[in-house]
Each structure stands twice: as structure tokens, then as C-alpha cells.
Image (cartoon, rainbow, N blue to C red):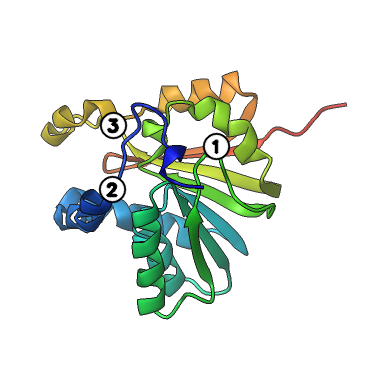
Amino acid sequence: MDGTLYLDGEERFGSISSTFYAISRLIPTMRHFYSFVINDLSSLEFLTILDIGSGDGYELVSLAEAKKGFIGYGIDPSPQMVRIARRRAAGRHVESRIKFDIGSSRNIPGKENFDIIYSSLSFHHWKEREAALAGIMSRLNEGGSFIVYETFDDGTFNRKFVKSHLMSRSEFEQIASRNRLELKRIGENSGFIAAEFGVLKQTA
């Protein structure tokens, strides 16, 4: 697998953009968003977790430092990002528990299933997001969840500059309905949103 995993129109990260990706964490809104994601995941029970669009590995490595007793995998279509993430895991001494590889929402490597699969500020970029859902849901253990973390329009001034990146409660409700998924919860906090999907149980 290589960088061709990107579809036309999806945000790409090469050598330069990957190197400067961490600068976004200097922005207060982004720091708060990462804390929102890590705190939410830390509150859940799971033994295995997959981060789709793991970027430089900050969230998954930080989660491993905050929470013990799980194995984590991160995938990203950018080879440069994967290299940075692997260095981060080794530098924080969690490489025995946290692995990174090249992959995407449509190309999840391996055959393992997971208790939780999540995407953080990546889902809104996917050009074939609903086509990817069937594959993602098939890689969940029984009772598992796919969680999408995004931002929504809370009326604050800075949201006016990132309208193309925003998602809403109604969008997630529609996605669940169209794809016959269980919408387990939608959590909103300070302009951030977490939508948790599960596989609907078949009725007799």
C-alpha cells in the first residue's frame, strides 16, 4: 500500500505537510479537541482499538499513556505520517502496544477485528465515506463501536472559517438511517461532537 490510497479531493500529507502537522496542536481549539477525544476514549472499555487516519500518532500514543490494558493500531494513507507516528510510539516507549501502518478507511490492512474503531477529524474528508462504512463495521467485534469525532457549528466566530470541515447531529442521524446502523450516542461538548455507531441486531 502507498500514497495512492488517497482519492481525488481528499486532503493529502506529504513530507513537508506531515512535518508541520504538529503545529496545529499549538492552536487552543485543537488542543481542546484532542483532549475531548482522548478523555472520551479513556472512559470506554476495550481491549483492541483502531484509529483510521491516525496522522502523526499523537492521539493513539497519548491514549496509551493515559490508559493501560489495550492494544492499539493506527492506519494512515500517508507513508510520511506513519513514519512519524512510529517514531512517536518508540519515543514514548509504547511501541509494544501501539502499531502504525499504511492504510485507509477503504483499505484496512490485516484481518483482525476490533472492539473500537474511531476516526478523528478525518471522516469529513472521506470522499466515499458511506462506501467505507460496510468494511469498517465488518471489522468490529460483536458489540463493538465505530466512533467519529468531528467539530460542529456551535455559533462561535472561528467556525465561520472551517465550514467545509463541520458536521452536524442531523448528518450523523441520516448516515445511520441510510446505512441501517445503530446510532448508540451523539455527544456534544464545546463545539466538538462524537457519534458512536454500532451494527443493528437482526430481528427474527
**According to the image, label 3 marks what residue?**
165
Pick out the residue farthest to the right.
Answer: 204
Q: Quadrant of residue 145?
A: top right
Real-space Cα separation, disc 1 to disc 3, in angstroms? 20 Å
Screen quadrant of the C terminus:
top right
Q: Tell me if residue 104 comes above or below residue 39 in the rendering.
A: above
Check disc 1 and give the amino acid type: Arg
Residue 66 visible in the snapshot: yes
Choose the circle earlier in sequence order: 1 or 3: 1
Check disc 2 and give the amino acid type: Gly
Real-space Cα separation, disc 3 to disc 2, in angstroms? 20 Å
Q: Helix or strand or loop: what does disc 2 sit on?
A: loop
Write the residue at 36% across / 71% down: 87
Write the residue at 56% across / 26% down: 131
Residue 43 visible in the snapshot: no
Left/right of residue 28 with respect to residue 53 in the rendered view = left
Left/right of residue 172 with respect to residue 23 in the rendered view = right
Tags 3 and 2 touching, CB below 8 Å:
no
**According to the image, label 2 marks what residue?**
14
Write the residue at 46% across / 76% down: 94
**According to the image, label 1 marks what residue?**
106
Check disc 3 and give the amino acid type: His
Could you say which is closer to the camera, residue 37 or residue 130? 130
Q: Quadrant of residue 34?
A: bottom left
Q: Helix or strand or loop: what does disc 1 sit on?
A: loop
Q: Helix or strand or loop: what does disc 3 sit on?
A: helix
Write the residue at 58% across / 52% down: 116
x, y percentage for residue 46?
Answer: 60, 61
